[in-house]
Image: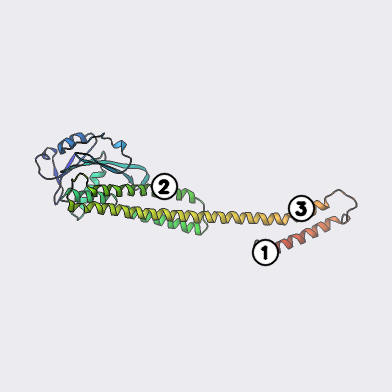
């Protein structure tokens, strides 16, 4: 269990010091430590404490505290595993339940930055949620570059393996869009402050978090639209190739149709038919003429 007193800097405290310290604090605890941490922080949560049940970002108001959860996609495996966190807020303290070291790493990044970690709970929460999406703009830029590279391949006609690359990108972008949408709603819920746990002048921090998440969602929606445009371009090139193949087969069929008619005519088993006496030269000559005429016709129509 880690206890950090809020002030100009985050100061480490022993858990036993929490009751006698007048300052607000941030407590980071594992699932096994959370019941004891809630008792030290004077929190009462009417629900089950289970990180395994965390599947999306949300927050709910209870009589004694605010209870929220974060289900954060890993940037290197967006569709796969996630960081799962629960957090609780009352009028004095913030409790973060995390079985890994993700929350502590975020707090360390806040401490290493030149900004003040926060003398208030509102400011700390602002920096904490901001760190969640701090690198996401860079990640979304990488998606933009990947889509541009795919678009160039399509324009050059290199279509092999396109579907195997565009489908994962769309899945990951859809996951990120849902994540940013949930963060936007979470920030708005905190800004409404139904329990009046926060100072009114400090609520602007939550509005800023919500605005940032909303901008990220807008960027993600734009990338999804771009991905759809690239996919439409790919489908257009595939259709163009299929049309060319069909056109080629049509030309070949058209050329061989009169040849089939000629061979069928001279292949009939009759004795008194004109041209049978010298049939082979006539068939060969007529076939060559038909082929030449067909080729000239299709070239004039730019179909060959």
What's the distance in space between the residues labelled 3 and 2, CA to CA? 53 Å
Q: Is residue 257 left or right of residue 198?
A: right
User: In the rendered image, which residue does mark 3 sit on?
Assistant: 260
Q: Nearer the viewer, residue 178 or 26?
A: 178
Q: Residues within 10 Å of mark 1 (few under 14, many from 20)?
A: few
Which label is found at residue 299? 1
Mark 2 sits on what residue? 171
Q: Is residue 85 above or below residue 149?
A: above
Q: State which tag comes first along the sequence, 3 or 1.
A: 3
Q: Is residue 248 left or right of residue 111?
A: right
Tell which residue pokes out farthest to the front in this image: 194
Which residue shows up at 29% across the image and 54% down it?
212
Q: Nearer the viewer, residue 56 or 13?
A: 56
Question: In the figure, is residue 14 to the left or right of 231?
Answer: left
Residue 160 coordinates in the image, percent (x, y): 51, 52
**Residue at x-position 32% and y-position 47%:** 182
Q: Within 10 Å of the Cα at label 3, are there few (<14), some (14-19), or many (20+) other Cα atoms?
A: few
Indicate the position of residue 215 as horizontal and vertical percent values: 32, 55
Q: CA–CA distance between discs 1 and 2?
A: 46 Å
């Amino acid at each position: 269990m880690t206890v950090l007193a809020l002030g100009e800097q985050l100061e480490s405290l022993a858990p036993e010091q929490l009751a006698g310290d007048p300052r607000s604090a941030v407590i980071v605890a594992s699932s096994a430590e959370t019941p004891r941490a809630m008792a030290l922080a004077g929190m009462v949560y009417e629900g089950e404490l289970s990180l395994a049940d965390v599947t999306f970002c949300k927050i709910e108001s209870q009589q004694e505290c605010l209870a929220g959860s974060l289900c954060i996609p890993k940037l290197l495996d967006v569709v796969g595993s996630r960081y799962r966190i629960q957090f609780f807020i009352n009028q004095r303290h913030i409790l973060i339940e995390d079985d890994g070291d993700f929350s502590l790493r975020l707090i360390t990044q806040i401490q290493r930055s030149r900004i003040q970690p926060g003398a208030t709970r509102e400011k700390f929460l602002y920096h904490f949620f901001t760190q969640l999406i701090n690198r996401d703009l860079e990640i979304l830029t990488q998606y933009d570059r990947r889509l541009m590279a795919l678009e160039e391949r399509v324009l050059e006609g290199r279509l092999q393996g396109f579907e195997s690359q565009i489908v994962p990108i769309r899945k990951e972008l859809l996951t990120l869009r849902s994540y940013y949408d949930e963060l936007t709603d979470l920030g708005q819920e905190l800004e409404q402050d139904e329990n009046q746990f926060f100072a009114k002048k400090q609520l602007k921090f939550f509005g800023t978090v919500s605005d940032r998440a909303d901008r990220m969602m807008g960027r993600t929606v734009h990338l999804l639209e771009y991905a759809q445009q690239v996919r439409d371009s790919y489908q257009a090139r595939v259709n163009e190739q299929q049309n060319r193949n069909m056109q080629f087969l049509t030309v070949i069929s058209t050329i061989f149709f009169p040849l089939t008619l000629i061979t069928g005519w001279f292949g009939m088993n009759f004795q008194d038919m004109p041209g049978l006496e010298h049939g082979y030269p006539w068939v060969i000559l007529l076939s060559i003429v038909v082929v030449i005429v067909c080729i000239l016709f299709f070239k004039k129509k730019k179909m060959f």
